[in-house]
Image: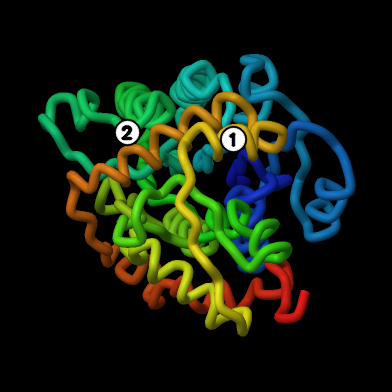
Amino acid sequence: MSQPILITGAAGGPQGSTGRLVAGLLLKQGISVRAFVHKLDARSDELRQQGAEIIEGDLLSPASVQAAMKEVKRAYFTYPVADGLLEAVTIFAAAARDAGLELVVNNSQFQGTPGDPAFRGLQRAPSFRNLQHRLADRIFDWAQVGAVHLQAAPYFENVRALVSRSVAEQNAAFLPWGDDKTVIPLTGAEDVSRVAATLLAGSGVPSEDVYPLVSETPTVREIVETLGRAIGREIRYVPITDEQWAEAVKERINPHALDHLTHLWQYFRKGEEHFQATDAICVVTGRTPQTLEEFFLANAKSIGPAGQ
């Protein structure tokens, strides 16, 4: 594949960092990567050393997005949990259409409620951010750029970020997830990235336009017990209110993300949906998805080893 694949979010963020993972997977295959980054720093320097072409730009700037699209036929789109998603998608989709892209792999979000096919569940979106993703999917579809949507459940990495501090300090997970029977569908960012990289590296056009990615559907009790086994000590789950949780994390999470997560927890607590694991990761990549326990074992040191 002579033309570079454009990867947004290539520098990586504080949690899933799928853009960085996708870029790395493609570079390891010897595929040309154009890494779109918000700023030049040590992360972009590392990507350049790995062989990526670095483009500094802003997804909210039509000029920089159009420049990044030159001589590109395939792209990966991801956007942080922050304000500006619909604006960025519209800019990116318009530029992709003008540039004649044949495939855009869109990092979308879990859509557990199918709803009326004409609206794809717009009426019952768990949060405003989730509704934005559902609308973003439609924008990409209307642009006719070969969009494929990876509709992923919350990441294992999100769970780690939510509990690492309290587990390390108090051997407890303080979360507004209701009782310990609440089901939380999850998947790993590494598997989402493998799916994206596989689709982008493929010689043909993907057979599906939507890939629902759910690796596991554990209860809160199972999540906490799995974490305890991985780090070698018992962990308590302490249910708290939405208000208590918001107060505890407001300095670490931006208002947009805080609103999204608060409504997502409320949605899961209601227990109105029956979540099921999907086979999309295995079908696309040929690999069994990473389990939550495998993720916790691989990241035990970042959560806090026994005795701390």
Q: Quadrant of the N terminus?
A: bottom right
Spatial CA span between label 2 and label 1: 18 Å
Q: Is residue 244 above or below residue 222?
A: above
Residue in view at x 39 percent, y 42 percent: 265
The answer to whether residue 144 shows anywhere in this view is: no
Residue in view at x 32 percent, y 33 percent: 126
Q: Nearer the viewer, residue 32 or 46?
A: 46
Q: Where does the image place residue 263, in percent across and percent down from the top left?
A: 39, 32
Residue in view at x 72 percent, y 67 percent: 302
Mark 1, residue position: 80
Q: Name which residue type carries label 2.
A: Pro
Q: Where does the image place residue 289, in percent across and percent down from the top left?
A: 41, 72
Q: Name which residue type carries label 1.
A: Pro
Disc 1 crowd, CA 10 A, few/some/many (<14, 14-19, 20+): some
Helix, strand, or loop for circle 1?
A: loop
Q: Quadrant of the C terminus?
A: bottom right
The answer to whether residue 285 shows anywhere in this view is: yes
Q: Dividing the picture into quarters, in which one does residue 103 lie?
A: top left
Q: Nearer the viewer, mark 2 or mark 1?
A: 2
Helix, strand, or loop for circle 2?
A: loop
Mark 2, residue position: 126
Disc 2 crowd, CA 10 A, few/some/many (<14, 14-19, 20+): many
